Amino acid sequence: MSEIECDVLIIGAGPAGLAASIWTSRRKLSTVVVEKAMPGGQMLLAHDIENYPGIERISGQELAERMKKHAEKFGAKIVYDMITRVYTEGDKKKAVGNTNTYTAKALIIATGGQHRPLKVPGEEELVGKGVAYCATCDAPFYKGKEVAVIGGGNSAVEDAIYLSKIASKTYIVHRREEFRAEPDRVEEMERLGVEKILGKSPEKFEKKEDGRIVVHFKEGGSLEVDGVFVSIGYIPASELFKETGIEFTETGHIKTDLQQRTNIPGIFAAGDVTGRLAQIATAVGDGAVAGMNAYKYIQKPYWG
Ligand code: NAP
């Protein structure tokens, strides 16, 4: 296990973490970004991004790669590690990973969140066997087959649009009569022939002998498909930070002020883990604010 010391430790290399690292490393602070998987976070799941100003259309993977290169250009180090403990020792912010330990003057939490499960019988057992949470990752398994997306937000509608181009038939199941998603995306989904099943919530999933999945609804009735994509939002990845004494909102997000400061001096949070609008542009904005304020916290410039 190696010991890594730096000015700023950033946990999470999604758009918030990578943006923060651009702001801190450009101001010559030694910056380490720890990521457990590939840099990019939820961006990696976005097929086409059309609302990031200045870039009319780009895949999430390409934007992630560009942000990573941009951060590295200014000297930020991206380290692959799984952090298991975060705590403070005096002014120092400490983290323990499976590979390294980290000591920093400031910490920026940019861990985002994980897919929210429906928590219905059959769901957990069938993950990877007909039930999935990531359309971009698992869609190729359903080429020419029938799929259902559960949810009514932007993610569910985006997933349905994506799947409709691969599957032979795509349904979207939403518990209300109207969608939370942006109207133009709903129109696009309708144009692509996605069949809407409204006012229905899954009660349980069942796998038949032929491998097909039956979605039973609480309101009665069922739907039989080859695959189900659950897309009902995210849970913030904030649990890890309890030991630091930072405050959380009722929904488990990390509480920050408009400067992205938590209640613990030198600990900042940015992006989806704070529970604000989950957009790449706003995550980047949060990351920039957190990065700049980490700089002010460490260097205490005369103008800060
Ligand atoms: P979301 O906006 O919170 O929507 C979650 C959806 O799942 C809602 O329609 C909700 O229904 C439904 N739902 C929640 N719990 C459920 C349950 N137990 N059973 C059945 N349905 C349930 O989450 P999201 O779509 O993942 O999006 C998260 C954030 O990312 C949002 O801010 C979204 O705008 C953003 N996003 C943006 C884009 C884009 O701009 N291109 C793409 C993806 C995501 P109700 O409506 O009835 O509550």
Image (cartoon, rainbow, N blue to C red):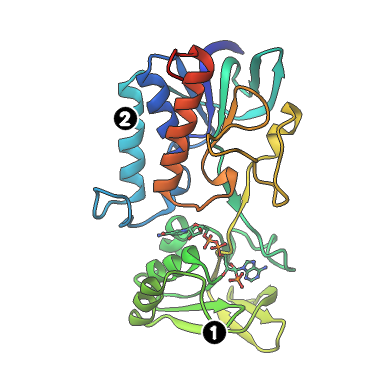
Residue 97, position as x, y percentages in the image: 63, 23
Is residue 123 or residue 288 the one in the foreground?
288
| Point 69% across, 34% down: residue | 240
Q: How many marks?
A: 2
Q: Quadrant of residue 94?
A: top right
Q: Quadrant of residue 142?
A: bottom left
Q: Report the Cα–Cα distance between label 1 and label 2.
A: 43 Å
Describe residue 34's horizontal placement relative to residue 19 as left or right: right
Residue 122, position as x, y percentages in the image: 71, 67
Outermost front residue: 303
Determine which residue is flagged by label 2.
Answer: 69
Query: Is residue 40 visible from the viewing direction of this image?
Result: no
Q: Label 1 is placed on what type of residue?
A: Ile
Is residue 233 or residue 195 the one in the foreground?
233
Residue 177, position as x, y percentages in the image: 56, 84
Determine which residue is flagged by label 1.
Answer: 197
Q: Quadrant of ligand 1?
A: bottom right
Mark earlier in primary sequence (1, 2): 2
